[in-house]
Image: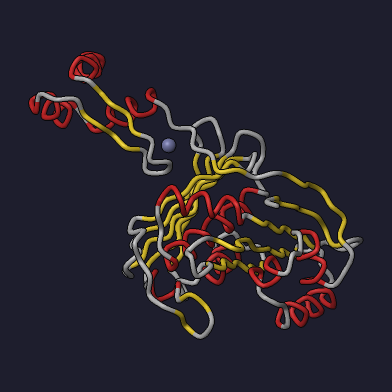
Amino acid sequence: MDEIVKGLIKDEHVLVVAVNCTEVVEEARKIHDTWPTATAAMGRVIAGTLLLASTLKDKQKVMLQVKGDGPLQEIVAESDWLFRVRAYVKRPHIYMGLKGEKIDVGRAVGKGFLNVIRDLGLREYYQSSVALQTGEIATDLAYYLNTSEQIPSAVSLGVFVETDNSVKAAGGFMIQTMPQTKPEIIDFLERKLSQCRSSSTMILQGLNPLQMLEEAVGLPIELLLRSEISYSCPCSKDRVINAVVTLGKKEIEEMIEEGKTVEIECYFCKRKYELTLEELKNILKDI
Ligand SMILES: [Zn+2]
């Protein structure tokens, strides 16, 4: 069952977060009709975004964008503070075979950048980006947290795709130490994590997120939060109109000259919105 948990290692200054987002990633796969390599990459970005969302305050949002020169081109996921997540991948029909036993996400992403955009509410944004290290997403996200946010972090993300292309497991975990964390605990965790099974293996074997964390760190955990997650897109006709306004006068005039109803599809959920000539003229009037 999909859920996210956040906690602390009992009596230690170590933050731990884990998520099982198998159902959400399967829903995203159906919406975008992704092929296995695209499914795995999108699933890892979704899981990573949900882990980041565990540090949000009320009304905040976080977006993770991975842009590379590989065939997938761009993958984006966005979550709000209630773990309502949405995602898309620019080129969904990508399958590049396996690298060992794993889907070769790194080659499909290629070289490029990972961007994190935090919407802190009240039109305040914080954006930061790092160069992709491997394109495997988990190492890139850990690199971002370690360098850009300067939080010592370990990240594991995994997606398992069935032979019928459906998602059998998707999720991950994140471990973050603090300035007060004892050095012997850091040494212990490094050893522990180097021997750890992959997130997708743990989910396939039926472990829930709390059990994943207990296995990963090998110490008791004090829960701070346990929450459901969902695939949800807040798009609406009003938001589509706002997006059209940002295109500018000239572009809208051209649309009107074409003389027909314009159909606009939401990137994230594929819902279609129609704007009639009348509506386009009204938008132009209001600019
Ligand atoms: Zn939408």
Specify the quadrant that holds the C terminus: top left
Please state the horizontal and vertical placement of residue 110, each as a whole percent of the image: 37, 72
Which residue is outermost to the right? 11
Number of numbered discs visible in the structure rendering:
0
Which residue is outermost to the bottom? 100
Please state the horizontal and vertical placement of residue 105, each as a whole percent of the image: 45, 72
Quarter location, residue 93: bottom left
Pick the front one: 205 or 253:
205
Residue at 39% from the left image edge and 27% from the top image edge: 239
**Would residue 7 be found to the left or right of residue 95 on screen?**
right
**Would residue 151 be found to the left or right of residue 109 on screen?**
right
Please state the horizontal and vertical placement of residue 232, each as a whole percent of the image: 53, 39
Q: Vertically, is 31 above or below 163?
A: above
Quarter location, residue 138: bottom right
Which residue is outermost to the front? 164
**Would residue 3 be found to the left or right of residue 62 on screen?**
right
**Would residue 98 be found to the left or right of residue 3 on screen?**
left
Pick the front one: 124 or 282:
282
Please state the horizontal and vertical placement of residue 217, each as a whole percent of the image: 80, 71
Residue at 34% from the left image edge and 29% from the top image edge: 240
Pick the front one: 202 or 189:
202
Residue at 70% from the left image edge and 82% from the top image edge: 194
Q: Quadrant of ligand 1?
A: top left
